[in-house]
Image: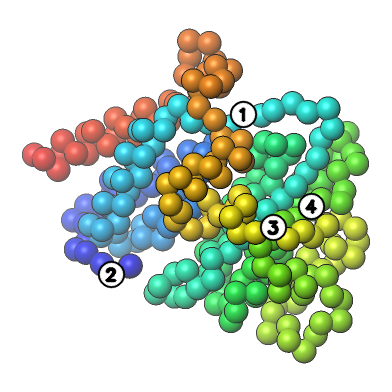
Amino acid sequence: MPEEGALLTDPTQYRTLVGKLNFLTNTRPDLCFTVQTLSQFLQHPRTSHLQALLHTLAYIQGTSTKGILLNGADQLTLQAFSDSDWAACPSSRRSVTSYLILLGSSPLSWKSKKQSTVSRSSSEAEYRAMAQAASEITWIVRLLEELGVSGLTPVQLNCDNQSALHIARNPVFHERTKHIEIDCHFTRDKVLEGLLQLHYLPSSSQLADVLTKVLPGPHFKDLLSKLGMVTTSDHSSLRGGDKHTLTATLTAGLAALLSSYLITLAS
């Protein structure tokens, strides 16, 4: 909550650590939801927010060998997962949008962000998430085509909400969707163009859940393994010979900052 706990006397350290965590999300999709949540309290951070930040740093220290493995494949394919946690924010009741795009079996693009407006239903929240994913898919397909990679369409977009899928597929479903902004029907246009192929999957198999909400530990680890995150003990190629990767370097730096900050608090 925004006003839970006492205000920090010196918020500089909190802002510095969260700012560094933003860089780490470029290689660690498992941190995206946490970092976007912590970033919402940069203006007036409190002790409860600092405690959550320290908990995050402890998780990073324990998973410093985890990273993304880019697997090769004879046939390149794109598939996407979109998800939303309806009215997730307890203070503003705005939903969290997330999407994950895989090239083959490797994560290529991901995002976790609180929506800018309040959604009146879970279907609307999911449909907005689909629109964000559709926009990213359009850009990625055009980029890959310029690089000489063709034959990627239609891209399979997976969603766990049947109502949102029905809205996107039905071009004359007007009366019940007037409250949804016009730009959200971007998804419907891309389906009609043949760029997207919508597919339903159960929530238990929704990979984008790791970017949307807090999950139980076993389920969280299971989804991470499915989206292509491995440990360096499994694949030595994640380490550049005797040199640490960029992720390991950032993790070590955050661990050092955490140690110095805890020493400061103790003194």
Q: Which is nearer the N-term, disc 1 or disc 4? A: 1
The residues bearing labels 1 and 2 have C-alpha atoms spaced at a distance of 40 Å
Check disc 4 and report the residue beneath it: 156
The residue sitting at 55% across, 16% down in the picture is 236
Toward the bottom, the furthest residue is: 175
Which of pointers 1 and 2 indicates the residue nearer the eye? 1
Which of pointers 2 and 3 indicates the residue nearer the eye? 3
Colour scheme shown? rainbow
Look at label 3 and name its amino acid.
Leu
The answer to which image quadrant residue 238 occupies is top right
In the rendered structure, find residue 69 and report the number of the disc placed on it. 1
Badge 2 marks a residue whose secondary structure is: loop
The residue sitting at 29% across, 45% down in the picture is 54
Question: Relative to 167, does residue 100 appear above or below in the rendering?
Answer: above
Look at label 2 and name its amino acid.
Glu
- Tell me the crowding category of disc 1: few under 14, some 14 to 19, or many 20 or more residues within 10 angstroms, Cα based: some
Check disc 3 and report the residue beneath it: 201
Q: Are marks 1 and 2 in contact (CB under 8 Å)?
A: no
Badge 4 marks a residue whose secondary structure is: strand
